[in-house]
Every structure is written in structure tokens, then in C-alpha cells.
Image (cartoon, rainbow, N blue to C red):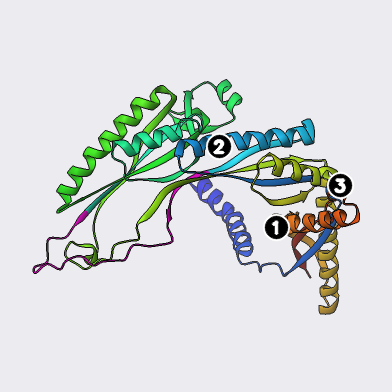
């Protein structure tokens, strides 16, 4: 018994010393620090250019408009590839399709509707969007006409979307597609996506009550959806993406004086697509713009000059920012009468700044250059030289450093 008591007593100083040491660590003062930020810039001659062109089409027919847009875009792409060769990367994006109303010079005189003695029940409006997705733009014009004939009120949004293609559970399929969408049953589910063109058709139906407007609207939605599915078949997808029932504003109820809108002349359609090309052949900027415009591009959006490999410029900017931060820290420590110790924290942010020339500036300069050449030699057609000289693109970096001082 006495041995156990002696052993317990002999262990107490060790426990007390450990507790005192732990307490001392918890109450130790935080180290004194200073924070500085250094900035560095570098520049290099650009070796890569990116041009963005707008291709537009206008027609009285939806089918003709999409056909013209597709044909013109292909001509522009072919012209860019022929001018720049295999080194160029050409892609299309931002496809849009919009119906518009053209009004004549003489608008109809607005006439108010007759006023009723008693206010009628509120009018309710049902609205739904039916989206149809296709593998290409070719069938979109016919699909619009089919949807409108089936009862759709108008054409809403349009564009390009990425749609799931098929589900693959094997990792090899993910390696081929490079996309992982989620997890299922403890394992990763891999999914492949494909490019789809879509048009949204809007269905609107009015009623005297929510059930009335909903009943009328769903009949039309079913009819439009059935007609589109029958036409697109297995080459696309049709789905209802949004719907709702809302009460109209009191001013929109029957019985309130409402001016009639101007009588439309006719409906027209507009389509637009962006064609983007990347190339290292900066000396072919002028011929590239000329070839795209001759092939049907409506305008040049912009030209961006960048670096294909910015690692050297990034390294130089970070080194300058680090030296700037160190010099600031040394000056600050010397002026405050303290000494720098080790670095506790450091972070950096570096980013390139491409040189961008917008299309209106470029085309204005090209027109002026072409006019000058024409005055100098009207007998021999010459190509306008590039009106802008690619300036060096810049690269900036910021380095944030926390020093411990004593």
C-alpha cells in the first residue's frame, strides 16, 4: 500500500511540470509581424492573336434565315482556314435566333376600347415554354413553323447548349470524355455531353380564372409538344422547361380603355453567330480580316494579342514583385528600428493583360489606310496595311509577404 502511495506522489511533480509548460505555451504572446506588398510588371512581344467576327442573317422566313446563317458561317470558317492554314484554330459560338416585327411608316391610329358599366372578373394568363433541341441548325426553321402552327404564340430564347449524351460507369469512358458529373452508389458516374442547338417556343392562354387559363394553356402545350416530337423524332429532344399562371394587371382587364398597338407590316427573323479564330501568324491580320468580310462576316468584333506561352513573362513579373516586397520590408524595418526574421506567410497573384483592338477602331484605320493607298496609286489595287501595330502585352504580379520582426 505504501509503495503505491509513494509512486503516486513521485509522479506528481512530472504532471505539474507538464501542465505548467502547456499553460506557458497557451499564454505565449503572438509574434510581432509586418505585412508588405510588392508589385512587378513585365512585357513581351505578342506571338498569338485572336479575332472575333459576327455573322448575321436577316429574312422573312425562319427556315431561310437559319439556312443563310449556316451557309455564311461555313464560308467564313473556310475562308479563315484557307488564309491562315493549319496553324489556325477556328470555332463558332453564341448562336442566337430572334423574330421581330417591322412596322410601316404609317401607324394605325390608337382607338380606346368601350368602357363597361361593371368591372368584369380579373383576367388570368397561362404561359409556358416548350424547348426543342436538335443536332444542327438545319431543322430549326421547320420546327418553328410546326410549333407556331400547332398553337405556340411566339419564339422565345435560342442558342447552343451542352446536353448529356449517354451514361458511362467505366473510368475508361471518363478518360475519353474528360467529364465527371457526380457520384452514385458510392462510385463516380461519368457522363458524355454533346453540342445541341435549341429554340424555345412560348405558349400563352388567357382565361377568366386560374383553372380556366390553365386548362386552355395545357391543351395547346400538349398539341405543340406532340407536333414537335413527331417531327424531330430521335434526332432531338422536346421538353417543357417553364410554366406559370399569373393575374394580369388591372389595366389589362377587359373593360379598361386600351389603345391598340400600331399595325405590324410583317414578321422578320434575325440570326447571329460569332466565329473565333486563333493564330500565331500576326503578319496575316489584314488579309484575314479582308477574307472574312468578303466571305460574308458582318463585322469584326475585336482582335486580341496575347502570348502563347506566358511563363517567362510571369516569372519576370513575380521576381520583380518579390524584390519590391523585400525592399519595402527592409526599408520599413530599418526606419522603425527592428530586425527582420523569417517569413511567416507569402502569397502571389499574377495575371496577363492582353492588348485588345476593337473592330470599329480597326476597320476605321483600315479604311483610312486603304483610301490613302488608293489616292497614291489608283491604277493598281493594293491591300491596306494593318492600321495598328501590336504593342507589347503586359503581365503584372503582386506578392504579399508577412515577416516576423524582433
In the picture of the structure, the residue carrying the numbered disc 3 is 382
Q: Nearer the viewer, mark 2 or mark 1?
A: 2
Say whether residue 298 is visible. yes
Say whether residue 161 is visible. no
Crowd class of label 2 (few under 14; some 14 to 19; many from 20; radius 10 Å) = some
Badges 3 and 2: C-beta atoms under 8 Å apart?
A: no
Q: Is residue 314 above or below residue 254?
A: above
Percent of width and height locating residue 330:
85, 70
What residue is shown at x 19% (from left), y 43% (from top)? 216
Q: Is residue 132 above or below residue 335?
A: above
What is the span of residues highlighted in magenta in the rendered image? 96-124
Label whose residue precedes the other's in the sequence (3 or 2): 2
Residue 16 located within the stretch drawn in magenta: no
184 left or right of 18 in image: left
Work out which quarter of the rendered image holds the C terminus and state it.
bottom right
The numbered disc on residue 68 is: 2
Closer to the camera, 338 or 349?
Answer: 349
What distance separates the C-alpha of mark 3 from that of mark 1? 21 Å
Label whose residue precedes the other's in the sequence (2 or 1): 2
In the picture of the structure, the residue carrying the numbered disc 1 is 360
Amino acid at each position: 500500500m505504501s509503495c503505491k502511495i509513494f509512486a503516486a506522489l513521485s509522479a506528481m511533480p512530472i504532471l505539474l511540470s507538464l501542465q505548467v509548460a502547456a499553460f506557458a505555451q497557451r499564454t505565449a504572446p503572438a509574434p510581432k509581424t509586418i505585412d508588405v506588398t510588392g508589385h512587378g510588371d513585365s512585357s513581351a512581344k505578342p506571338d498569338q492573336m485572336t479575332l472575333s467576327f459576327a455573322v448575321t442573317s436577316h429574312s422573312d422566313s425562319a427556315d431561310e434565315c437559319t439556312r443563310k446563317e449556316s451557309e455564311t458561317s461555313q464560308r467564313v470558317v473556310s475562308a479563315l482556314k484557307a488564309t491562315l492554314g493549319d496553324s489556325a484554330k477556328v470555332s463558332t459560338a453564341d448562336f442566337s435566333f430572334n423574330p421581330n416585327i417591322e412596322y410601316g411608316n404609317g401607324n394605325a391610329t390608337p382607338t380606346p376600347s368601350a368602357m363597361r358599366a361593371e368591372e368584369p372578373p380579373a383576367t388570368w394568363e397561362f404561359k409556358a415554354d416548350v424547348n426543342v433541341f436538335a443536332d444542327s441548325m438545319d431543322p430549326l426553321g421547320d420546327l418553328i413553323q410546326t410549333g407556331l402552327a400547332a398553337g405556340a404564340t411566339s419564339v422565345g430564347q435560342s442558342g447552343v447548349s451542352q446536353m448529356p449524351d449517354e451514361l458511362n460507369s467505366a473510368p475508361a469512358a471518363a478518360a475519353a470524355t474528360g467529364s465527371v458529373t457526380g457520384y452514385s452508389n458510392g462510385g463516380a458516374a461519368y457522363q458524355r455531353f454533346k453540342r445541341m442547338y435549341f429554340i424555345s417556343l412560348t405558349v400563352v392562354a388567357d382565361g377568366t380564372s386560374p383553372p380556366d387559363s390553365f386548362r386552355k394553356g395545357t391543351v395547346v402545350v400538349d398539341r405543340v409538344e406532340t407536333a414537335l416530337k413527331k417531327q424531330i423524332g430521335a434526332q432531338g429532344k422536346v421538353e417543357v422547361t417553364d410554366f406559370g399562371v399569373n393575374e394580369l394587371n388591372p389595366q389589362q382587364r377587359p373593360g379598361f380603355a386600351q389603345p391598340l398597338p400600331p399595325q405590324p407590316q410583317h414578321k422578320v427573323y434575325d440570326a447571329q453567330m460569332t466565329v473565333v479564330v486563333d493564330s500565331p501568324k500576326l503578319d496575316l491580320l489584314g488579309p484575314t480580316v479582308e477574307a472574312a468580310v468578303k466571305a460574308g462576316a458582318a463585322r469584326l468584333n475585336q482582335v486580341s494579342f496575347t502570348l502563347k506561352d506566358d511563363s517567362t513573362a510571369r516569372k519576370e513579373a513575380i521576381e520583380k514583385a518579390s524584390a519590391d516586397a523585400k525592399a519595402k520590408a527592409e526599408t520599413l524595418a530599418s526606419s522603425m528600428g527592428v530586425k527582420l526574421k523569417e517569413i511567416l506567410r507569402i502569397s502571389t497573384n499574377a495575371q496577363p493583360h492582353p492588348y485588345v483592338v476593337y473592330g470599329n477602331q480597326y476597320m476605321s484605320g483600315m479604311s483610312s489606310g486603304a483610301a490613302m493607298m488608293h489616292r497614291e496609286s489608283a491604277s493598281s489595287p493594293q491591300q491596306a496595311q494593318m492600321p495598328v501595330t501590336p504593342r507589347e502585352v503586359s503581365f503584372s504580379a503582386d506578392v504579399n509577404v508577412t515577416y516576423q520582426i524582433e
